[in-house]
Image (spheres, helix red, strand yellow):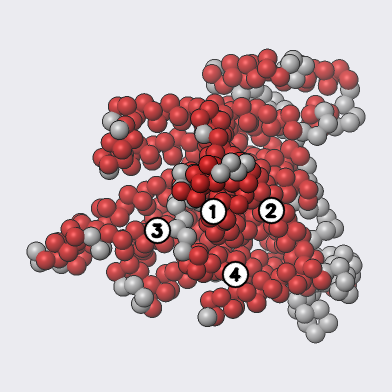
Amino acid sequence: MLRFLASRILSALVVVLGVACLVFLLIHLVPGDPVEVMLGESARPADREALRRALGLHQPIPVQLAEYFKGLAALDLGESLHSKRPIVEVLAERIPATAELALAALLVAVVLAIPLGIIAAVKPQSGFDAGAMIFAVLGVSIPNFVMGPLLILVFSFWLGWFPVSGKEGFSSLILPALTLGTAMSAILARMVRSSLLEVMREDYVRTARAKGLGEFQVILNHAMKNATLPVITILGLQLGTLLGGAVITEIVFSWPGVGQLTIESIQNRDYPVLQACVLVISLAYVIVNTLTDLVYAWLDPRIRIGETA
Amino acid sequence: MTRVWLPAILLLAWVAAALLAPVLPLNPNEVQLPKILEGPGAEAWLGHDELGRPLLDRLVSGARTSLLVAISVVAISIFAGTLIGMTSAWLGGFWDHLIVRIIDVFLAFPGILLAIALSGILGPGIENVVFALAVVGWVGFARLARAQTLSYRHREHVLAAIAMGSGTARILLRHVLPLIAAPLIVEATFGLAGIIIAEAGLSFLGLGVQPPDASWGSVIRAGTRYMLVAPHLLVLPSLALMLVVLSVNMLGDSLRDRLDVKRSGVT
């Protein structure tokens, strides 16, 4: 287990370094002179030179990269061009909102998907199964920026149950979490169904039934335990889609998180902030995926033994 | 059978609208101020938008944008991804390790986020959208092509071809590619659905095609601003987008069943 742990963490570190390099390179993709794009054409030459120095853009690229990593190691991401505040401080304000939204969406996804998937698997080919699978296809086919506004139209404007946008208390969390969680629950429900169908054919399920356990217990205590494994992997992988989707969902609902900051930084041409946002969201994704792998290995000894052999 | 025919007909309508858009008598950019936000009627079937432009014309013209972007991105991604993936698996050793690492790094970004950042930095415009989405898109194909090529590398017919002195390019193209084509095609259909959504998403955020050109995403964005007074402006383009994506996904599903391809946790 220790070797597996070390190798997973090592490879995650390599990925993180790669991600940071790519994020660093982003600013060099700006067409023309990034400083001119950020300040506008009418900026005074002295201001341009000052910004170029502040961002270190006058140095050769390898030196810039080294400086960038030095900054990262010290948790110093530089200063926002727009608000003139340290980026770390700006991010710290926004991260909790995104984390709250992502967790709520995850909860929505799991709460919707697991019962749907289980019932669909227990009664395959039934009307309920067909309905659940239609929900699954619909869920992946409705983008966030369609789902969100439609929910606002129905539940905020017509029914008046929830606030239209912003972040004030629990009721404002519900619609964004539903928007973000439904798509994920669609994929998850499919996974629960197919993975449960697979284990229901196993011998130990037959044994459990043969010794007289009720169907409910067979499914929850015997089948679900093993069916959960692939579901956890998908959950980890889907978190990337979730975090990406959070950017659009936050815009739809004016949710003050990292996603909204990302778009604001694009509109303000505040590239250092944009880089920081991309870095933070990707880091969160890498960390969660690594943790998922570790949990998976902890739950299923076959994985870690296979890995080290 | 309806599972195949219905989506196929919808997709044909989409492609036809996109291809015929330049020759149809459309006025997607004609501003008619007296008709602002007017609902559907006999004169304009789907009503007018916030500048009085006919919504139907804008949706047809948006279909062209979305088809153009989707086809270009899938074509570039599948070509680059397959080339990189197959080469990586064939070369093995150091190069394979390096390419796998690069793939891992790209997979570590939530796809749409990287596309948003790239289009934000490159500036709006259809070419930049295609570039941004292709940068994200090749990875899935590369990973799949690599895994598939690895599994066929030591098959007898490939070894026979090597023994007969065939060149690498010939072996990969004639003896490996035909075998790995099916899963790549299935992956491409799902990729297509994702790219249609992503293009609309970027346009929704104002990072896609620029006004006055129409994209479903930008029409939906306008719809969200006026949804209380003119729900048709939100509901109709959303429906168009959903139906196309749904059709692609349903066809992808039945294609997968027919080609008997297992999707190995690729998302």
Count of number-bearing discs: 4
* Above or below for A249 versus A83: below
Residue A94 place in picture, x, y as percent: 56, 37
Q: Where is residue B246 shown, x and y percent of the image?
A: 58, 68
Question: Pointer 1: what residue?
Answer: B180
Residue B151 seen in the current view: yes
Quadrant of residue A185 in the image? bottom left
Q: Amino acid at mark 3?
A: Met
Q: Residue at x 53, y 55 (%)?
A: B179
Describe the element under mark 2 as helix, strand or loop: helix
Question: From the viewer's perspective, is the residue at label 2 or at label 4 nearer?
Answer: 2
Residue A191, label in figure: 3
Give the amino acid at mark 4. Ser
Callout 3 secondary element: helix
Kindly report which numbered mark, 2 or 1, lies closer to the viewer in this rendering.
1
Q: Is residue A137 above or below residue B187?
A: below
Question: How far apart are the alpha carbons under marks 3 and 2?
Answer: 29 Å
Q: Position of residue A169 (x, y in %)?
A: 49, 49
Chain of the residue that carries numbered disc 3 in the rendered image = A
The chain identifier of the residue carrying mark 2 reads B
Q: Position of residue A275 (x, y in %)?
A: 64, 32
Decide if residue B96 is on the left or right side of residue B204. Answer: left
Q: Quadrant of residue B123?
A: top right
User: What residue would you read off at disc 4?
Assistant: B247
Which amino acid type corresponds to the residue marked 2 in the rendered image? Ala
Name the N-terminal-most of marks 1 and 4: 1
* Marks 1 & 4 on one chain: yes
